[in-house]
Image: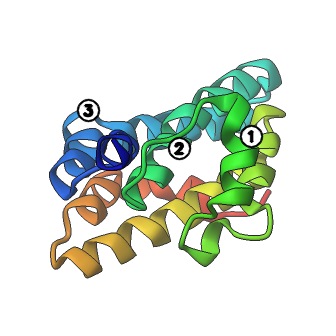
Amino acid sequence: VTEAVRRQATFTDEEVRKLLVEESRLDWFINDSFRALKSHRDGRPRAARMDSAGAVPPMVELIFALAGRVSPYNKYLEWELTNHPLPSEEWRDGRLLSYVEGMLDGDVASVRAAFQAVERECRAYDKKKGREELGNIIDEWGGDLDIFRRVD
């Protein structure tokens, strides 16, 4: 029973790849984050908040997947992070929840900070696995990524 429960709560490397690449969670997160920043730039705060909020589900899924874990239901996210912290320092000390709250509010700085943390994590995952697959997905965005790196 213990093994069956563990198996339902974790991903294999191939399942992580399928979720992030084939099911496009990484692209989904980048796309909605990008739209949020463009809407903010263009003076559309409501659209920016909606797109920023839309980026939260794929972000949480991909962050947990990079750790080989299935993301918890929203109501258990804080409990999970407190009782079973993610291994990366990127998400410690309440940072992930801070990004989530900021993104739900449409906070541009939170969108940018979350993107930059996700990018570092994806590249570290690639390095650990000896490939460049996630980094390549990010790099395909080319010059559009500049919007994540500037400060308003």
Please tell me whether mark 3 sits on a helix, a strand or a loop. Answer: loop
Looking at the image, which residue is at 22% across and 53% down? 12
Residue type (three-letter) at the residue carrying disc 3? Glu
Q: How far separated are the C-alphas under marks 1 and 2?
A: 11 Å
Give the label, 1 or 2, closer to the camera. Answer: 2
Disc on res. 103? 1
Q: Give whichever of discs 2 and 3 has the lower sequence position.
A: 3
> Mark 3 touching mark 1, by CB under 8 A?
no
The residue at which mark 2 appears reads as 59
> Mark 1 touching mark 2, by CB under 8 A?
yes
Residue type (three-letter) at the residue carrying disc 2? Met
Looking at the image, which residue sits at the far front? Answer: 1
Looking at the image, which residue is at 44% across and 47% down? 62
Looking at the image, which residue is at 75% across and 46% down? 78
Give the label, 3 or 1, closer to the camera. Answer: 3
Q: Give whichever of discs 3 and 1 has the lower sequence position.
A: 3
Q: Position of residue 103 (x, y in %)?
A: 74, 40
The residue at which mark 3 appears reads as 23
Q: Quadrant of the N terminus?
A: top left
Residue type (three-letter) at the residue carrying disc 1? Met
Give whichever of 122, 45 is nearer the camera. Answer: 122
Q: Give whichever of discs 1 and 2 has the lower sequence position.
A: 2
Q: Position of residue 3 (x, y in %)?
A: 30, 49
Is the residue 13 above or below the residue 61 in the image? below
Within 10 angstroms of label 1, few (less than 14), some, or many (20 or more) residues?
A: many
Within 10 angstroms of label 3, few (less than 14), some, or many (20 or more) residues?
A: few
